[in-house]
Image (tube, rainbow, N blue to C red):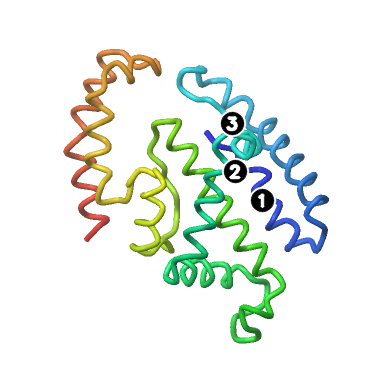
Amino acid sequence: MIVSDTLQRHNIAIEHDITIDEAYRVSVLAGQRWLKENKAALDNLSSSQCVVTMWDEWMMHSQYAETLKEVRGIYEASGVVRQTVDEKAHSFCVRPASEQSIAQCRDFDSSVTYILEEVAAFAVMFKETRAIDVYPGTWFKEVFVESFIKLGVPDHRLNKIPQVYRDVITDTNLLKEIGLDDSQIKKLSASSMIVTSLCDKLCS
């Protein structure tokens, strides 16, 4: 489980018109408050089922700086990727797009930084940890996704989930390592067709 507390410093700075350093301190407190409020639920999970990490842990990861450099390189070199990121960053700006151009948007640079930071951190996460990322939204265009898959981010788009699911449930050693018993593994295996059917419906 990733608590993206300090990633939100970019949004907090914009929303409250404060410096990024002030926003960072606010975001840390917000993360700590979230952990406290959800402690009871988290305590019900064993350490083998759920490991909670904070955003700064990934920012300080040994591979993060180089990965961010690669992500920025793709952003700067690919016109389509830059356009996709810029369009999304522009949509994050405080004022409607009709009122100003991207160059005039005071929040544009911060929004781009947010997006690239998030992509780089998740690329590092997926290189280190096997997981299925469930993320709301559809703004990643195909060519944008392909660029970051080349960085090592697993292809977990909706049409790929059935195969990802099958790969996970057939790795019994992994499932037992995270605390599942034989009966639970059997139930997961029996649900494979249901997962495929649901994904097919969502894709159609």
- Say whether marks 2 and 3 touch (CB < 8 Å): no
Q: Amino acid at mark 1?
A: Gln
Which numbered marker is on residue 65? 2
Please tell me whether mark 1 sits on a helix, a strand or a loop.
helix
| Point 55% across, 44% down: residue | 66
Image height of 18 relative to 46, above or below? below
Label 2, label 1: how far apart the Cα atoms are: 19 Å
Q: Quadrant of residue 31?
A: top right
For this rendering, which residue is in front, 184 or 53? Answer: 53
| Point 20% across, 40% down: residue | 194
Q: Quadrant of residue 192?
A: top left
Please tell me whether mark 3 sits on a helix, a strand or a loop.
strand
Q: Is residue 98 left or right of residue 138?
A: right
Residue under label 3, please give it.
Answer: 53
Locate the C terminus and report the quarter of the image it occupies: bottom left
Q: Amino acid at mark 2?
A: Ala
Crowding at label 3, few (<14), some or many (≥20) Cα neighbours within 10 Å?
Answer: few
Q: Position of residue 169 (x, y in %)?
A: 25, 27
Q: Position of residue 193 (x, y in %)?
A: 16, 38
Q: Earlier in the sequence, mark 2 or mark 3?
A: 3
Residue under label 1, please give it.
Answer: 8
Q: Earlier in the sequence, mark 2 or mark 1?
A: 1
Q: Amino acid at mark 3?
A: Thr
| Point 58% across, 72% down: residue | 90
